[in-house]
Amino acid sequence: MHLVSRELDTGLARRGYQAELDALEIWMQIARHDAAAADRLIDRFTSVIAQLAAQPHLGPPVDYLLPGLRSIPVGNYLIFHRPEDDGVFVVRIIHGAWGLTPELFEYELHARTKKPP
């Protein structure tokens, strides 16, 4: 189970380590009760990420969490992404009921600055 991370007709969609872990954890939680529903949700994520590759500036900016970050809802989840020159980079996928704080994005911040957390 992987999110899209390939060149699309209109841009490149990349996903970070945390986004991949988030998707796996979401899939595992839902699949315990309904594997088909878990697969459908991952397919929805993948479809939205492909759309973001074509239109990376979709969704409102959420700079208070991480400079340059945007979010877009998919069901009860939010896909946090960063527009790039050649497409989009998916940072995290988080349930909308979580309290959103900059600490949820520390890994990405440190990866961008090359400093350990």
Image (cartoon, rainbow, N blue to C red):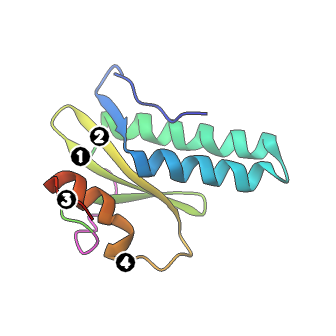
Q: Is 76 drawn above or below residue 89 in the view shown?
A: below
Provide residue 70's location: percent of width, then percent of height.
30, 59
Please say whether residue 57 is visible from this viewpoint: no
The residue that label 3 is drawn on is 68
Instruction: Tell me which numbered mark, 4 or 1, is placed earlier along the sequence.
Output: 1
x 18%, y 52%: residue: 112
Label drawn at residue 83? 1
Instruction: Tell me which numbered mark, 1 or 2, is placed earlier along the sequence.
Output: 1
Location of residue 65 by image quarter: bottom left
Q: Residues within 10 Å of mark 2 (few under 14, many from 20)?
A: many
The residue that label 4 is drawn on is 101
Q: Which residue type does callout 1 highlight?
A: Pro
Q: Which residue type does callout 2 highlight?
A: Val
Provide residue 6's location: percent of width, then percent of height.
38, 24
Q: Which residue type does callout 4 highlight?
A: Thr
Please, what is the dominant secondary structure of the magenta stretch?
Answer: loop
